[in-house]
Amino acid sequence: MDPPNQNLHTGSRAQSEGGAHLPSSGAEDSLFPCAHCGNTFSHAWALKNHECACAAERPHCCEICGKRFTHSRSLERHHLVHTGERPHRCPQCGRSFSRLGNLERHQRIHTGERPYGCEACGKRFSRVEYLKRHQLIHNSEKTALQCASCGRGNQKGCQR
């Protein structure tokens, strides 16, 4: 059996879909370890959320379609698929949404808000997925500026 993973999970999902794992700081008495994979968490609630996913537990079942969920709140939100309920209405145009976050994203059409900025060129976007798609042009620019011989950037031309 492999030794337990000595990573600390902060409870944040900022790093990746799986969450941010950081090297353990040595405060072992305040950590909450996962019995399945050995990852450690700084909060009991973070461990509880992780353990459901880690053990592939999905105890909450939709009575209509049988789809299963890790958390009861996810099941409640799923029920809107079957009811067609769209409780969040845009005051500007009347369009309705099942999720508040979708309404908030939609409202940027009316307000012109562009909260996501490109660090490379400063261009701003209303949705994070538009920013990510845009950033691909900067990645291809970097590749185009690399010397085919040595791989270094060749702003002034390669001497090799």
Image (tube, helix red, strand yellow):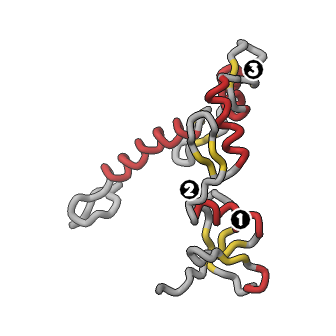
Residue at x-position 71% and y-position 30%? 104
The numbered mark at residue 48 is 1
Question: Could you say where residue 84 lies in the image, as x and y percent from the top left?
Answer: 65, 22
Residue 41: name its quadrant.
bottom right
Relative depth, front residue between 111 and 66: 66
Residue 106: x percent and y percent?
66, 25
Mark in the foreground, 1 or 3? 1
Q: Quadrant of the C terminus?
A: bottom left
**Badge 3 amino acid:** Arg
Taking 121 as reference, is 9 above or below it? below
Q: Counting other residues with Cα less than 10 Å from the Cα at mark 1, is it few (<14), some (14-19), or many (20 or more)?
A: some
Specify the label residue 89 is tagged with: 3
How many angstroms separate mark 1 from mark 3 (CA)?
Answer: 34 Å
Residue depicted at x 70% and y 27%:
103
| Residue 6, picture quadrant | bottom right
Pointer 2 residue: 17
Residue type (three-letter) at the residue carrying disc 2: Glu
Q: Are marks 3 and 2 in contact (CB under 8 Å)?
A: no
- Label 1: state its secondary structure: helix
Q: Secondary structure at mark 3?
A: strand
In percent of width and height, residue 21 lies at 61, 70
Q: Secondary structure at mark 2?
A: loop
| Rendered residue at 37%/47% (across/down) | 141
> Callout 3: few (<14), some (14-19), or many (20+) C-alpha neighbours within 10 Å?
some
Label 3 and label 2: CA atoms lie apart by: 30 Å
Which badge, 1 or 3, is on the more N-terminal residue? 1
Q: Which residue is the extreme one toward the front?
A: 63
Q: Amino acid at mark 1?
A: Lys
Query: Is 90 above or below relative to 69?
Result: above
